[in-house]
């Protein structure tokens, strides 16, 4: 709104949650833990059976991190959101979202703060289900991707071995020709 002098007046925007009063927060809600690799069962290797029945043992790609060798364990995130009572001391608005500074903790958006413990507990249950399912789907996709890489690797290196064996036979044949004594033309 402007007054007659091209100056803007500001309206107050109500904040969704009160400051300096007890509120319920969903918390951080996760713990990272190391578990035995579900793909290799901690052995660091898997055995793949190719379409022709040939068995190939490969380093496990699921518990391998980058170029490091397999570890036999993977990091898994376990979600456990639980209501925590907090006091919001400050609020900021970025775009359409309100962010609250929590005393002694971090900053959170208003969607994770509740007036009652019951509302917060219901949201925590929902977050636990959703995030656990997302993590499960991500792990399935990761395993599938790494299996694809292992299948490619087994096929690729199998072809390399066969090509090198064929080249070795050709080289041996050529070498044997070079070693044959020359017949004298007399």
Image (tube, rainbow, N blue to C red):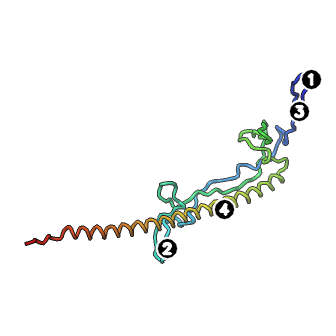
User: What percent of the width, then of the height, locates residue 89?
Assistant: 78, 36
Q: Nearer the viewer, mark 4 or mark 2?
A: 2
- Badge 2: how crowded within 10 Å, few (<14), some, or many (20+)? few
User: What percent of the width, then of the height, locates residue 42?
Assistant: 52, 64
User: What percent of the width, then of the height, locates residue 90?
Assistant: 78, 36
Q: Residue sitting at 26 percent across and 71 percent down?
A: 173
Distance of label 1 from label 2 (alpha carbons):
82 Å
Instruction: Please give the residue where the numbered disc 2 appears in the rendered image.
Output: 50
Q: Is residue 44 visible?
A: no
The kind of secondary structure element at disc 1 is loop
The kind of secondary structure element at disc 4 is helix
Distance of label 3 from label 2 (alpha carbons):
70 Å
Q: Earlier in the sequence, mark 4 or mark 2?
A: 2
Q: Earlier in the sequence, mark 3 or mark 4?
A: 3
Residue in the foreground of this view, choosing between 175 and 32: 175
Distance of label 3 from label 1 (alpha carbons):
17 Å
- Is residue 13 depicted above or below 158 in this figure? above
- Is residue 54 depicted above or below 102 in this figure? below
Instruction: Please give the residue where the numbered disc 1 appears in the rendered image.
Output: 4
The quarter of the picture where residue 102 lies is top right
Q: Nearer the viewer, mark 3 or mark 1?
A: 1
Instruction: Please give the residue where the numbered disc 4 appears in the rendered image.
Output: 137
Q: Is residue 45 visible?
A: yes
Which of the numbered marks, if any, corresponds to residue 87?
none
Instruction: Please give the residue where the numbered disc 3 appears in the rendered image.
Output: 11
């Amino acid at each position: 709104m402007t007054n007659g002098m091209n100056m803007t007046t500001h309206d107050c925007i109500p904040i969704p949650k009160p400051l300096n009063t007890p509120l319920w927060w969903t918390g951080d809600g996760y713990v990272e833990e190391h578990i035995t690799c579900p793909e290799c069962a901690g052995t660091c290797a898997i055995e793949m059976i190719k379409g022709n029945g040939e068995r190939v043992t490969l380093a496990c790609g699921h518990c391998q991190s980058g170029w490091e060798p397999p570890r036999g364990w993977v990091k898994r995130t376990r979600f456990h959101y639980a209501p925590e009572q907090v006091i919001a001391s400050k609020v900021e608005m970025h775009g359409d979202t309100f962010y609250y500074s929590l005393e002694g903790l971090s900053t959170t958006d208003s969607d994770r703060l509740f007036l009652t413990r019951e509302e917060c507990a219901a949201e925590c249950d929902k977050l636990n289900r959703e995030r656990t399912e997302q993590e499960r789907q991500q792990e399935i996709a990761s395993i599938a991707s790494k299996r694809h890489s292992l299948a490619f690797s087994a096929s690729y290196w199998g072809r390399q071995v066969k090509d090198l064996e064929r080249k070795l036979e050709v080289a041996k044949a050529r070498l044997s020709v070079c070693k044959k004594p020359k017949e004298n033309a007399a």
